[in-house]
Image: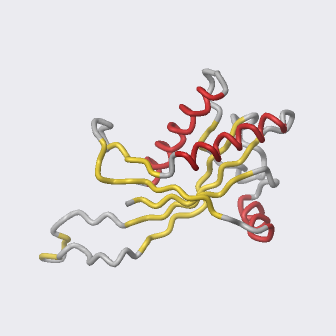
Amino acid sequence: MFDQALTFLITQLNQFLTQRFSTSEPVAVLSNLANSDGSVPAGIENRLVMALLNVERVDNGVMPAPVRGGAPMGPTTPALKLRFIVAASFDAKYGDGLRALNAALEFFESHPVFSLPDASGASPAANQLVVDMVSADLETLNTVWTTIGARALPSLIYQAALR
């Protein structure tokens, strides 16, 4: 479920960014920011990188589906909160990275609610994705980048609630 949500978001963001910067190449990618050995993953240079930081289950106060014979009678989809980072991986083109990151900020500020398509992509489902920016102080950012195992890059942290 959350993989589809992030793929959906990166697609929407790229549609906005490719139009904004008049390019046919994707400006943003869904990727790790560092390989397990600490090296930089292929394909993220001169791109915005969206990476999942955390998935949390949200207690929305809804009772679980009734159980009959040990099995739920209906589907039970938990409400989830995704935390993700959007980082500018533009070593040689720092200014371009900041412009792309600013455009991503504008996109998510102007489009905070998304209707997710169903699994077949045919029509919108009742599921919504609500995206909010997360304020993080320098200590928190340092912890995030240390945990990721990458050097710090200009970045934005968001949370997306699946409803």
x and y percentages locating residue 160 in the rendered image: 51, 58
Residue located at (79% from left, 50% from top): 153
x and y percentages locating residue 103 in the rendered image: 66, 40
Residue located at (43% from left, 72% from top): 58
Closer-to-camera residue (19/162):
19
Closer-to-camera residue (25/37):
25
**Direction from residue 19 to residue 81 in the image, left or right:** left
Snapshot quadrant of residue 62:
bottom left
**Direction from residue 49 to residue 109 in the image, left or right:** left
Snapshot quadrant of residue 23:
top right
Closer-to-camera residue (31/122):
122
x and y percentages locating residue 2 in the rendered image: 45, 54
Is 75 situated above or below 29?
Answer: below
Snapshot quadrant of residue 140:
bottom right
Outermost residue toward the left in this view:
68
Q: Quadrant of the C terminus?
A: bottom left
